[in-house]
Amino acid sequence: MTQFDNVSVVKKANVYFDGKCISHTVMFPDGSKKTVGVIFPSNLTFNTGLPELMEINAGVCKVKLAGEKDWKTYKAGESFSVPGNTSFDIETVELLDYVCHFITESTCCAG
Amino acid sequence: MTQFDNVSVVKKANVYFDGKCISHTVMFPDGSKKTVGVIFPSNLTFNTGLPELMEINAGVCKVKLAGEKDWKTYKAGESFSVPGNTSFDIETVELLDYVCHFITESTCCAG
């Protein structure tokens, strides 16, 4: 799936870390939310509110979740999960293209 | 209007000029297309295919259309039009947040 259908898109970009991360917010009919964005080469720490699933469209990144010792590498076609109310470090050496899925009850885990 | 409703969004970003311009493509039920994006501080020349209406959400830019002598300044809340199959120079000194409306018969000028 290369696109999201039947959604709303906020016109104005989200700008984080002085522009190192740029995203646009996409809202779904079920009330859930995702962002589509890029991260420029950098070393950043993101804080999470909701749990997130980070889907990598292009590029590669190294990620270390708060409390973990090891960095893991993720590339295009892969994804990683981050719990809510925590943080993760991410290192990119080329442009990273991603979709961030914010996980709510409506989008997660029936049963 | 701060968002577009009932649209499709391409997950992967468009990256132009080595990342100086980042956008995401939004497609409308009538077949028309817009991009939502940002331009980092730079001096760039964009070529147009379809005519475009550039709507500025945030920031300020100076623009010179091909064949014109004078630069004009546009800021948040303003917009400028560019004919099809031409080019324009744009200078930004802060992050420019924009919506680019691609003008087709279905989106333009009844009668």
Image (spheres, coloured by chain):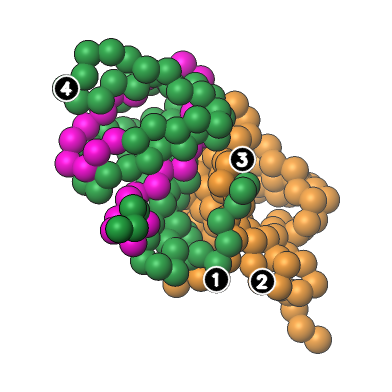
Chain colours: A orange, B green
Horizontal side of residue B61 vs A23, given as left or right:
left
Spatial separation of the CA atoms under disc 2 and disc 3: 21 Å
Name the residue type under label 2.
Pro
Foreground mark, 2 or 3, reads 2
Name the residue type under label 1.
Asn
Query: Which label's residue is closer to the chain start, 1 or 2?
Result: 1
Which residue is drawn at the image coordinates 58% and 62% (left, top)? B5
Looking at this view, is B90 or A47 the one in front?
B90
Which residue is drawn at the image coordinates 60% and 35% (left, top)? A15
Horizontal side of residue B25 vs A31, given as left or right:
left
Q: Residue furthest bottom?
A: A111
Residue that mark 4 sits on: B67
Sort mark 4 into few (<14), some (14-19) or many (20+) by Cα contacts within 10 Å: few
User: Is A29 rendered above or below residue B13?
Assistant: below
Quarter of the image with the C terminus of chain A in it: bottom right
Residue that mark 1 sits on: A6
Q: Indicate whether residue B86 is drawn in magenta.
A: yes
Q: Which mark is residue A29?
A: 2
Which residue is drawn at the image coordinates 46% and 42% (left, top)? B99
Foreground mark, 2 or 4, reads 4
Query: Which label's residue is closer to the chain start, 3 or 1?
Result: 1
Foreground mark, 3 or 4, reads 4
Looking at this view, is B31 or B10 the one in front?
B31
| Chain ID, mark 4 | B
Labels 2 and 4 within one chain: no
Q: Which mark is residue A14?
A: 3
Q: Which mark is residue B21?
A: none
Quarter of the image with the N terminus of chain A in it: bottom left
Foreground mark, 4 or 1, reads 4
Q: Which element is circle 4 on?
A: loop
Q: Quadrant of the rendered structure where residue A19 is?
A: top right
